[in-house]
Image: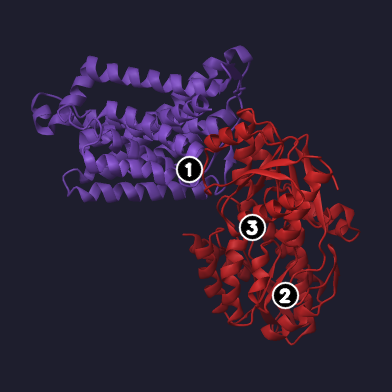
Chain colours: A red, B purple
Amino acid sequence: MFRILVVALGILTGVVGCSQAPEGEKIIKIVVVCPLTGDIAAMGQGMKRGAEMAVEEANVSGKLAGIKLELAAFDDRADPKEAVNVANEVISDTKIVGVIGHLNSGCSIPASSIYDRRNLLMMTPASTNPKLTLQGLKNVFRVCTTDDVQGSFGANYILDKLKITTAAVIHDKTAYGQGLAEEFKKQFESRQGKILSFDGINIGDKDFRALLVRIKNEKPQILYFGGMYSECGLITKQAKELGLTVPVVGGDGIFTPEYIKIGGKATEGDYASMIGMPPDKLPKAKAFMDKFKAKYPQVDMQPYDPYTYEATNMLIEAIEKTNKEPLQIVNYMSKIKYAGILGETTFDEKGDTLNKTISIYQVKDGKFVYCE
Amino acid sequence: MFIEQLVNGLTLGSIYALFALGYTMVYGILLMINFAHSEIFMVGAYFGFWLLSCLPVFSPQFLPAYFLIIFILSMFGAGLLAVLVERFSYKPLRHASRLAPLISAIGVSIFLQNLVMLTVSAQSQPYPEKLSIRQFHLFGVQINSLQIFIFGLAILLMIILKIFISRTKLGKAMRAVAENHTVAQLMGINVNTVISLVFLIGGGLGGITGVLNGLYYGSIKYNMGFLPGIKAFTAAVLGGIGNIKGAMFGGFILGIVEVLAAGYISSIYKDVIAFVILILVLLFKPTGIFGEEVTEKI
């Protein structure tokens, strides 16, 4: 069912795209792979929007002389098994020269080695687990910074700015969630903070009250969560109902308006760390924000829209400057110096961005507000 | 802490117990596991969601009446859907092999899930918060009004159901059909009507459980029925499937065990522990806890 839908979507975008293409234009395809359905689809839909905006602009600007760029969106449902299936489907299409995705680290890691078989560039705007780029694959680049930076930043912020020394940690056992929680724990403990408990939960669970009652009796000053907004929204809601009224701190996985929708009033005062500076604080990002508002007036921007936009633009530059062979694109990317909406991006030899800013936001009056 | 966990367990158990009644009633009368019941639960939750979003509360003093209307309409909507499912997917297969309606039920379940996913939303949706939840502190234990309400409503509905089945004429007809379709028919009971009635009641209970689940957890999704459905089915088997008292106790036992396992042992292994207990019960008492009362299947 999903597959039919996705293929239909691909054909539809293809048809619409082709109808505008003059005769004799060469077609080059790129794909964006992210969860378009399921619990965290809101974030994935945002990635798709970012990629669509970049491709549309490139086609309109005409900087790719004689080339018609096509974007296809694939759905990995945030499921590592499905991510591998999609990756195999992607490498079987030789017109595809680059991949933007995936969202979840748990999906990016197994999929990356499949793309590597065809030297296909994979640019992830969102997967933050350090292991992704430690595999020694040359085709993998990430525009966002990693969990070790983010986890320890969160720990430092809590210790230094909130003056809090005891924390309880919950994670969702995924590569991203557990990875982030472990990095947080490491840094928090190395600076004499006390971790009172470290628990995993199952994705898709709805009832966390039993765990939260136990944590309440440990009397932590803060609750750190490694995982996505769908679980964290329920955790913060149930925690506050049970009288565990300490703030919840999460990573980029909860930094979305959907978190506040699910958690409701209980999210007030919670914190989220997010990679990069807020887009409205960056000079070049202003234009992107305006374009986004003009194109999607009804939509709340999700955290990875700008990152995907940036990653797609970098891929387009690589296509523009090379002979369009996958390997050439990968080589170009390793030396790129791109000044875009996130500031200047260059990659280290592993493929990680050297732009490592982290920001902290707090929920105030139903909105994430930038703290530092 | 133990009392607090027990409160959580009883609330979760109430949801499982109400949910399990639908499985057990249908099994009692048709000897069939209605796998589509978890989707009746889901549709009930969505039906309540829709009603809560559309109907305004005119004044705070109407709130009890407002929720009464929401519950009755959601129950009726879900019950009606269950009757339609039975009419079109199970009834034509009533004389086929016992596997046929089972497969048909799985098909209905997949169909309804995908229908809601494609027509409503593929994402979690926050449930409207029209009920302000009050917190109570009793002897150092924190209980909220919604937990008391869910437990109270579950007990009330089960008492009404018990009285209906043991004291009324229709209840008597249901028991008769559960015992033997042919003989019941010979006694002048309209078997089809009785079966429809069972689906109406079971589906209605499933629907109201869906609404309670939505109010309690605050978010719903097209596949929300699957896991609680498996658990409720487990509760029905634990208590002795086909037996109403069994479904109630099975639900409460499962809810409490799950919460205690999550609170005292590990939140990851809570499902493992709950299901290990099920396996142990079935190994030593294959008919479930109340299984010996075979004669009174419903």
Residue B173 visible in the displayed image: yes
Q: Which residue is mark 1?
A: B224
Instruction: Give coordinates of residue B96: x percent, y percent.
Output: 17, 48
Q: CA distance from mark 3 to mark 2?
A: 18 Å
Query: How many numbered marks are there?
Result: 3
Check the picture and name the quadrant holding the C terminus of chain B.
top left
Q: Which of B239/B1 is in front?
A: B1
User: What residue type is disc 2 on?
Assistant: Lys
Mark 2 vs mark 1: tell me if same chain.
no
Q: Residue at x 40, y 43 (%)?
A: B273
Q: Is residue B185 above or below residue A309?
A: above
Residue placed furthest toward the top: B61
Disc nearest the viewer among 2 and 1: 2
- Of callouts 3 and 2, which one flags the residue occurring earlier in the amino acid sequence? 3
Mark 3 vs mark 2: tell me if same chain.
yes
Residue B218 visible in the displayed image: no
User: What residue type is disc 1 on?
Assistant: Met
Where on the picture, by quarter, is residue A215? Answer: top right
Residue placed furthest toward the front: A192
Mark number for residue A350? 2
The secondary structure type at the circle numbered 3 is helix
Check the picture and name the quadrant holding the N terminus of chain B.
top right
Q: Which residue is mark 3?
A: A179
Kindly identify which chain the residue marked by label 3 belongs to: A
